[in-house]
Image: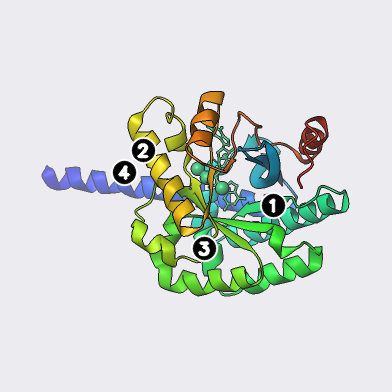
């Protein structure tokens, strides 16, 4: 009785596993096809100096425009792209397209507009990554000083292998920021040893910063930490004026979020720049 039961359970378990890997293979193949058939595109969310309201740059965010399913957000496919390794060619395309676009905006007289690109741990661990970045900068003619790479805090799990890569990138003039800062397990003590330029305060703390004393205290501590050790700090997920006022008073220099702008298509971003008279210095 018991035996039969557990056998049945195994059968169900096996079928579920099969379904998972089948689903995974279907999406993986669809992504591969999507990459070949140019179904991916980028949107750009403005980054603002919240102290003087100047535009300082954009964050490039990938989207997948699937022919049958329509627009698929990155939350639905990035982790699978990471698990299958497809993030390496996809990430290479994202970086290339970001730098190409950045160079085009340079040519259009958009000033010192910084283009930030999200990079997965998997990409950074690829032994060819630095060389790939060098090649892309060379091919596109984009100024490395205007390129920023956003790495999530989880990347810090493997510091010994990551630090030399970060140093090489920074020696090229590229800026590094730690995305979603505050959500990982980083012990603050090693932040000062990290070769990075910017901390990005995670949106979850910003969300109730004007109402919740704990969130406010955490954000304030991150801002103070950054200011003390000479890092820049940017708050993400700014959605209303109360957020801005609190962050400004706490000494946060930079911000991004729906309050300023949603992520925009290339043409929309160009309109945003023109209509707001937002030419970065
Ligand atoms: P992230 O890098 O932390 O990006 C911020 C996310 O918050 C974006 O979601 C953005 O659209 C959203 N956001 C911006 N302002 C607000 C706001 O005021 N309120 C709220 N609620 N959300 C806001 P998105 O574009 O769906 O991207 C989600 C995540 O997917 C990103 O988080 C990043 O981790 C990953 N991702 C996006 N594009 C790429 C990419 O090109 N490469 C890699 N490796 N990962 C990417
Ligand atoms: Mg990011
Ligand atoms: Mg973020
Ligand atoms: Mg985030």
Which disc number belongs to residue 168?
Answer: none
Q: Label 1: state its secondary structure.
A: strand
Q: CA distance from mark 3 to mark 2?
A: 33 Å
User: Disc 3 vs disc 4: Cβ atoms closer than 8 Å?
Assistant: no
Which disc number belongs to residue 115?
Answer: 1
Q: CA distance from mark 1 to mark 2?
A: 30 Å
User: Disc 1 vs disc 4: Cβ atoms closer than 8 Å?
Assistant: no
Label 1 environment density (alpha carbons within 10 Å; few <14, some 14–19, many ≥20)? many
Q: Which residue is mark 2?
A: 217
Q: CA distance from mark 1 to mark 4?
A: 48 Å
Q: Label 4: state its secondary structure.
A: helix
Q: Quadrant of residue 267?
A: top right
Q: Which residue is mark 4?
A: 12
- The residue sitting at 66% across, 43% down in the picture is 64
What percent of the width, then of the height, locates residue 219? 42, 40
Query: Sequence order check: which comes first, mark 1 or mark 4?
Result: 4
What percent of the width, then of the height, locates residue 103? 81, 56
- The residue sitting at 38% across, 63% down in the picture is 190
Specify whether tag 1 is near ligand 1 (CB below 8 Å): no
Q: Which of the two discs, 4 and 2, sits closer to the camera?
A: 2
Query: Sequence order check: which comes first, mark 3 or mark 1?
Result: 1
Question: Can you see residue 126?
Answer: no
User: Disc 4 vs disc 2: Cβ atoms closer than 8 Å?
Assistant: no
What percent of the width, then of the height, locates residue 230? 51, 58
Quarter holding ligand 1: top right
Q: CA distance from mark 3 to mark 4?
A: 32 Å
Specify whether tag 2 is near ligand 4 (CB below 8 Å): no
Q: CA distance from mark 3 to mark 1?
A: 21 Å
User: Disc 3 vs disc 2: Cβ atoms closer than 8 Å?
Assistant: no
């Amino acid at each position: 009785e018991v035996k039969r039961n557990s056998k049945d359970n195994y059968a169900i378990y096996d079928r579920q596993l099969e379904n998972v890997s089948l689903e995974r293979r279907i999406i993986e193949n669809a992504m591969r096809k999507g990459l070949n058939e140019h179904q991916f595109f980028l949107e750009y969310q403005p980054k603002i100096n919240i102290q003087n309201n100047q535009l300082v740059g954009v964050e490039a965010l990938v989207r997948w425009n699937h022919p049958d399913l329509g627009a698929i957000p990155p939350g639905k496919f990035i982790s699978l792209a990471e698990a299958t390794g497809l993030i390496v060619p996809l990430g290479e395309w994202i970086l290339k397209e970001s730098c190409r676009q950045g160079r085009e905006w340079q040519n259009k007289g958009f000033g010192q507009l910084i283009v930030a690109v999200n990079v997965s741990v998997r990409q950074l661990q690829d032994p060819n990554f630095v060389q790939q970045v060098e090649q892309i900068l060379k091919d596109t003619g984009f100024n490395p000083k205007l390129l920023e790479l956003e790495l999530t805090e989880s990347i810090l799990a493997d510091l010994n292998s990551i630090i030399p890569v970060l140093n090489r990138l920074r020696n090229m003039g590229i800026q590094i920021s730690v995305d979603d800062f505050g959500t990982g397990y980083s012990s603050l003590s090693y932040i000062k040893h990290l070769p990075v330029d910017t901390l990005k305060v995670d949106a979850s703390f910003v969300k109730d910063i004007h109402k919740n004393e704990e969130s406010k205290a955490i954000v304030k501590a991150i801002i103070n930490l950054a200011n003390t050790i000479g890092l820049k700090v940017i708050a993400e997920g700014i959605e209303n004026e109360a957020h801005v006022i609190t962050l400004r008073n706490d000494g946060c220099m930079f911000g991004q979020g729906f309050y300023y702008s949603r992520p925009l298509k290339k043409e929309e971003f160009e309109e945003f720049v023109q209509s707001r008279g937002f030419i970065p210095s």
